Amino acid sequence: MAPPPIVQQKSSSPSQPSGKSEVSDLKLQLRQLAGSRAPGADDSKRDLFKRVISYMTVGIDVSAAFSEMVMCSATSDIVLKKMCYLYVGNYARCHPDLALLTINFLQKDCRDVDPMIRGLALRSLCSLRVPNLVEYLVSPLSSGLEDGSPYVRMVAVLGVLKLYHISATTCFDSDFPASLKNLMLTDSDAQVVANCLFVLQEIWNLEANKSEEANRERETLLSKQTIYYLLNRIKEFNEWAQCLILELISKYIPSDSNDIFDIMNLLEDRLQHANGAVVLATIKVFLHLTMSMTDVHQQVYERLKAPLLTLVGSGSSEQSYAVLSHLHLLVMRAPMLFSSDYKHFYCQFSDPSYIKKLKLEMLTAIANESNTYEIVTELCEYAGNVDVPIARESIRAVGKIALQQYDVNAIVDRLLQFLEMEKDYVTAETLVLVKDLLRKYPQWSHDCIAVVGNISSKNVQEPKAKAALIWMLGEYSKDMPDAPYILENLIENWDDENAAEVRLHLLTAAMKCFLKRPPETQKALGAALAAGVADSHQDVHDRALLYYRLLQYDVSVAERVVNPPKQAVSVFADLQSSEVKDRIFDEFNTLSVVYQKPSYMFTDKEHRGPFEFSEEIGNLSLDQESMDNAPRFDESDKDLLLGTSEREENGGTSINGAATPGYSAPHDYNSSLVPLSSQTQSEPAVTSQTSFAIDDLLGLSMLAAPEPPSLKLNSKAALDPGTFQRKWGQLGVSISQEIPISPQGVGSLTTPQALIRHMQANSIHCIASGGQSPNFKFFLFAQKDDGSASFFLVECIVNTSSAKAQVKVKADDASASEAFFALFQSALSKFGM
Amino acid sequence: MLQCIFFLSDAGEVMLEKQMTGHHVDRSICSWFWDYVLSQGGDPSMILPVIASPTHYLFQVFRDGIVFLACTQVEMPPLMGIEFLCRVADVLTDYLGGLNEDVIKDNFVIVYELLDEMMDNGVPLTTEPNILREMLAPPNIVSKMLSVVTGKNSNVSTKLPDATASSIPWRKINTKHSSNEVYVNLVEEMDAIFNRDGILVKCEIYGEVQVNSHLPGLPDLTLSFSNPSILNDVRFHPCVRFRPWEADQILSFVPPDGEFRLMSYRVKKLKSTPIYVKPQLTSNAGHSRISVLVGIHNDPGKTIDSITVQFQLPLCVSSANFTPNHGTVNILADKTCRWSIGQVPKGKSPCLSGNLVLEADLEKLHVFPVFRVGFRIMGVASSGLQIHRLDVKNTPSEPYKGFRALTQSGEYEVRS
């Protein structure tokens, strides 16, 4: 890790020490005061301590004064004590030998008459975090857990967790978890109970992988008895503890519908809590409980709407953002429910743009027959907004609503009005939209073309907009008298055109125009092809050459390739699959919602930012889905071949996961209309078999791999999660089937790890797993052991209560998936034997 | 759970660092964060509240020039992180009598002490100001004076609050007061949007019932409204009992001591607003004329004061001059114009007219400002909510009860 950069200091600050002399000066003064019992000594000590702490606060290393600070710590003044605790806590880690000096006075303070001092001392003692001092922690902790003051007990409970993180064995040897469990069920103070719950959850979650017993203990936290005990006391807890308990309840699996309604009745008033975190946690419980009851689930939505909308309106913009992200999720799942509340999503002038963006997306989603007019009117007002990105976003939103087919008539008029605003970015966005609209509603071409024809191409500078304009010029050159001449003009300025995207479109448009109005365009097309062939950009060069040869070969073939009859696009592809949305929904009230990505997409290193600090993440992950279980061998060369270039793309899409559908690159719409590059309409087979094409690139002939009688799997196969993810998205499901699991298998499947180890022995590796009894989910993969890079990807959902596994197989080489499935099935059937 | 909290100044300087768990978070995360802020335009108030850095997830809240930054490496409810930071900011504002860099730097010891009590090992403990105040006395002038006079200088109360042990966590058991009084305050904020055609598209009230209670012992209060049915959605302080509200829409509660927000509510779909603002913009050959008319719409019966109209001139306006027939106009550096009217004078309606000179190559205006209106009406709750009665039980003598109401503008905007 790079050395921490020096924090920039304001040079004018007089209290900054110039160097070491200040620290040694402090040391000297502290030493003089250490033994002093003079009347003013405490005050001078306090001033000195304050200076030391202030140096520490601005990031200056004052650890040199450690022993002097400890010498001065013998005091009855509580403020001095607190400052001393703070100092010691900060530097004990880097001075374990000196930390021993503090033990004595901290232990003494742990026996003080004042509970506050006892508590503070115990907290500091546990926060030293020096491994070789663990032995000194045990006895103060055990007496702390039995202290008469709830304050001390509360501190002691968290102390146990700190001890666990330093030395788990000491913690278990002293039997602290058992005392905590007892305390949790009996203590009169709610905060002590809540802390016990927190500590036990964390300990058992971390231990669950290691021992069966811990796993059982974790289950008992979720038992009906514990849950109801906490539920009945819920009003005693403070707001934060309530969040913790609600989180636990959301994992509880109710036994029957009475159970569900009991819990919901007990929790209903939590929806009116002043703390937004409590409200959201309650909402999560409600949604999870009713997941399987469709009709109640709908009612729950209705019930949740009002509290959520109020939360959005009150509180700071940061709070409303977090709430809006969750609301966004609900809106996307059930837009109909919110269609009458659209006014809540109107943007206020003072909203930060991240909030406006979310609101715009929601307005787009909830538009339907009844409210489209109002929403579009509102959105159009934003087009004149001072905030340019929002103005753009709102124009796009209008376009998206138009593509949803409500009241298109009025919207097209509005869009055309935008073009008359003569504001460059408004024009640019609108052009792109008009193009998309025309692809979906060709019947509007007449009205649009009349307006588009009046736009001077000089006013359009953005590549996307320019490309859209050129596309329309080519496509509708018949209806636009000026089209060939505008194109000719653009081609003359070929060299000034920086964007390859625009040049590509220019070529295609010139072709289209030529095929419709040959005499007028011939010269321009010639110029375009000449410039294109000479172009330095590979794609432009290739396309120009392709057109040239096509024309040389046969003009009618060229016509069929470039200008085939088109069908209106009915639905534009949505970038975020419904599967991903479901995953996010399962993780309601987590960070996933804010990022609009399920957690496996960002907790996994592959999806993180471009650089990493080399700091270890540590083992404090609360999340079951840690990637530690995934085998990480060195990637084979072949895998790299496949991976590198595409991984970038993958990163790109996952970052703007919520980007506008059908609006990414103009390549998309070209390829969806006409297979542009080397594929002609007469060879549709090639497009649908991209997976084979990849194999072919690697020199693997399709015929050479007929169903192999016995499939061998590479026992050291490696696949990084990013590639897995990409492949999973690309490949179609080749087999989806339900397999029964033997009772022995069910018995052994108490944690996901058991199955993972078993499958790994059969050369099937796990990349991600999660869930709790009775539902476990695994993502597995295997690789063919014949030198090819052909992978099999498996999603396996195991339900132990029904003893069934739902298996989906996707394969690079679909022909071998039957054989693999047989192998997988036999491996699974041996589990637990 | 949160691993570390940093306070940053609006120049990106680390003012304070508080490690919460054994997983030490290096300060370099702050420079990463600040680089991110700079890459996003440099305004911390416009930064997403939740950011994924390469090593940590960051929560940030920006208040009064201070960035409250919290780091975590594990999944947690996002609102919990954000709410907690907001509470930290609230509590500090309350304790230090305002927030700014200097106040934090002068009082870092008490800030550390507060953070210590509010969170341990990443678990939020208590953020209830009443309880915190019992553990740590706020540094006010009186205590400073006392410390000078008596030579004792401790802001730590020697006794732990009983409340941590009581079943009413928001109140200590034996509150003693020389005064015996309770005030109920209805504070409403009106949000409204008028669209370009001057039509009211949205009008809502967000209201709060604020209570200031100085009652001895364990008083039991009930508050009822004459017209609770107008309330659309309500949220309560933890002290409010749920059943009486469900059954009869009565607020029954044991109040915390001092000031607190008893309830907040929303009243939707209001049809009328007390004030109208009519902006008009015309453009002609590089010049624009602007005129804004303000007047009282539906007389609320009390004086409307502190009327202001604020708008931002579009960037393409190169110069502007305004002449109001009432009040004063200030143009700030970022082209924000603020017209302070105060009260509407009798027999005259305030009007602002002005000329805008556009940038050289522009014919007419394409971007239109939003006019934000501010006002205040004392003595009126514009939603029409009325308090029916307040009963106090369990006090030795009948306390003094006071009621007030106030309406002010929230997000009240008129588009042009």
Image (cartoon, helix red, strand yellow):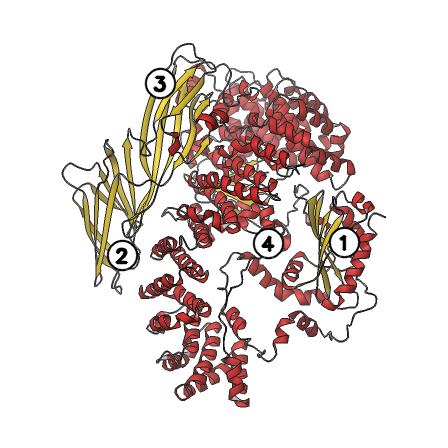
Label 1 SS: strand
Nearer to us in this view, B57 or A49: B57
| Disc 4 to disc 2, C-alpha distance | 46 Å
Total residue callouts: 4
- Residue type pointed to by label 4: Val
Disc 3 and disc 1: Cα gap in Å?
72 Å
Mark 2 Cα shell of 10 Å, populated few (<14), some (14-19), many (≥20): some
Amino acid type of the residue that numbered disc 3 sits on in the rendered structure: Lys
Specify few, some or many for label 3: CA neighbours under 10 Å numbering under 14, 14-19, or 20 or more: some
Image location of residue B57, percent across then percent down? 56, 45
Seen in the picture, residue A556 relative to B210 is either above or below; the reply is below
Quote the CA–CA distance across marks 3 and 4: 56 Å
Residue denoted by label 3: B401
Label 3 close to label 4 by CB (< 8 Å): no
Q: Give the structural element (helix, strand or loop) at label 2.
A: strand
> Could you tell me residue A757's position as x and y percent?
79, 50
- The residue where tag 4 is placed is A580
Q: Are labels 2 and 3 on one chain? A: yes
Residue to which mark 2 is pinned: B317
Distance CA(mark 2)–CA(mark 3): 54 Å
Question: Which residue is disc 1 drawn over?
Answer: A739
Quarter of the image holding residue B330? top left
Q: Is residue B115 visible?
A: yes
